[in-house]
Image (cartoon, rainbow, N blue to C red):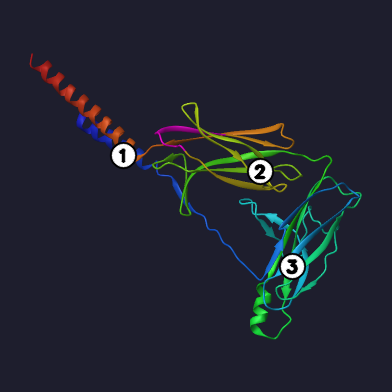
């Protein structure tokens, strides 16, 4: 193969390599909904032993201009395995973590327009209840009781839920697994992830699975390292109350990262602590930041080296055969 052909092969290979560095792009959508009721608080966390009774209250406000009759129900829920938001099970199906045999005081209520009502509830834990995690959603949903169409529509849209998390101490298995660490660039709802970036990534995403039979509230330290030096770090799941991972479920924790400014290889190190604080799960992920200007310089250098080698070879051949 001639030197000219070699030059074009090298150049084409370099362009193909550069084209494979484009990360994958995805999208995330967030939805919000409102109705004619407010509830406070939105969740209750209880730790109790078998045989105990734990009372708690919730306050509901009717922010409509009509009287509402609220049907009270207990629904089990599951994790969506991404955000940690509950997926309410609207049929009669029960999970192994149900509060069905523990919750007392649940009954339908009526609230006047712009009125409030405090509902007194309790968890009565049977003496033979195994240790572990139990949870459920107490829902209050308006029942249409008027022939007026607008009032019926208001009632149909009025619904709130209160989440209850119960910890029963004992022989509880506490174990988590860091399943995945993704590095992402998130701009205006568009998320691209991968191992090579032309523009600085600004988000890390940790997928953690709870392998135990209790609630997991992981925390820890995440660092971004360049050439062995930390350029950025943050504390995982550091808001109170800490985010919960339900038993046998996963949750994704998205957090901002900064200071990815220099071209080259970076390593994200995740040290995730769980349980009583003595257990740590470690995970690392590498990625490359290769901005266009850096690739352009590399391309020019390669072209100059190839051209210089070709020119030097021609000069050498010409000098040799001139003798």
Query: Residue 236's mark?
Result: none
Residue stretch rendered in magenta on the structure: 259-269
Are circles 1 and 2 on residues that touch, CB within 8 Å? no
182 lies left or right of 77: left
Confirm whether the magenta stretch covers residue 69.
Answer: no
| Extreme residue toward the bottom, this view | 147
| Location of residue 166 in the rendering, given as x and y in whole percent from the top left corner | 79, 50
Q: Residue at x 72, y 79 (%)?
A: 144
| Location of residue 180 in the rendering, given as x and y in whole percent from the top left corner | 58, 41
How far apart marks 1 and 2 lie (CA) works out to 40 Å
Q: Earlier in the sequence, mark 3 or mark 1?
A: 1
Q: Residue at x 20, y 29 (%)?
A: 307
| Location of residue 298 in the rendering, given as x and y in whole percent from the top left corner | 31, 32
Of tags 3 and 1, which is closer to the observer? 3
Q: Residue at x 73, y 55 (%)?
A: 43
Q: Residue at x 60, y 44 (%)?
A: 207
The part of the image, by quadrant, that contains residue 40 is bottom right
Q: In what element is the residue under mark 1?
A: helix
Q: Circle 3: is it few (<14), some (14-19), or many (20+) Cα within 10 Å?
A: many
Which residue is labeled 3 in the image? 140
96 lies left or right of 249: right
Q: Is the C terminus in the top left, top right, bottom left or bottom right quadrant?
A: top left
Are circles 2 and 3 on residues that touch, CB within 8 Å? no
Query: Residue 15's mark?
Result: 1
The part of the image, by quadrant, that contains residue 299 is top left
Residues 272 and 320: in front is 272
Residues 52 and 250: in front is 52
Q: Earlier in the sequence, mark 2 or mark 3?
A: 3
How far apart marks 2 and 3 lie (CA) works out to 31 Å
Which residue is labeled 2 in the image? 209
């Amino acid at each position: 193969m001639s030197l000219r052909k070699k030059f074009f092969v090298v150049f084409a290979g370099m362009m193909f390599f550069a084209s494979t560095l484009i990360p994958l792009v995805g999208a995330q959508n967030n939805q919000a909904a409102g109705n004619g009721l407010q509830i406070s608080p939105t969740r209750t966390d209880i730790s109790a032993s078998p045989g105990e009774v734990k009372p708690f209250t919730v306050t509901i406000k009717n922010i409509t201009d009509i009287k509402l009759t609220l049907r009270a129900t207990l629904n089990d829920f599951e994790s969506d395995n991404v955000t940690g938001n509950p997926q309410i099970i609207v049929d009669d199906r029960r999970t192994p973590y149900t509060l069905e045999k523990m919750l007392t005081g649940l009954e339908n209520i009526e609230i006047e327009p712009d009125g409030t009502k405090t509902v007194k509830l309790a968890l009565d834990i049977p003496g033979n209840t195994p240790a572990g995690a139990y949870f459920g959603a107490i829902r209050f949903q308006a029942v249409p009781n008027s022939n007026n169409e607008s009032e019926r529509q208001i009632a149909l849209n009025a619904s709130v839920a209160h989440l209850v998390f119960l910890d029963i101490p004992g022989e509880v298995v506490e174990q988590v697994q860091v399943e995945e660490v993704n590095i992402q660039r998130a701009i205006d709802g568009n998320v691209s992830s991968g191992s090579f970036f032309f523009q600085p990534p600004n988000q890390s995403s940790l997928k953690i699975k709870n392998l135990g039979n209790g609630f997991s509230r992981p925390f820890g330290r995440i660092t971004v390292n360049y050439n062995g030096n930390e350029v950025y770090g943050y504390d995982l799941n550091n808001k109170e109350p800490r985010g919960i991972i339900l038993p046998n479920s996963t949750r994704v924790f998205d957090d901002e990262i900064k200071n990815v400014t220099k071209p080259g290889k970076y390593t994200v190190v995740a040290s995730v602590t769980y349980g009583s604080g003595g257990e740590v799960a470690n995970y690392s992920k590498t990625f490359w930041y290769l901005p266009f200007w850096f690739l352009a310089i590399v391309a020019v250098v390669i072209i100059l080296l190839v051209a210089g080698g070709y020119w030097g070879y021609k000069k050498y051949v010409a000098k040799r055969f001139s003798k």
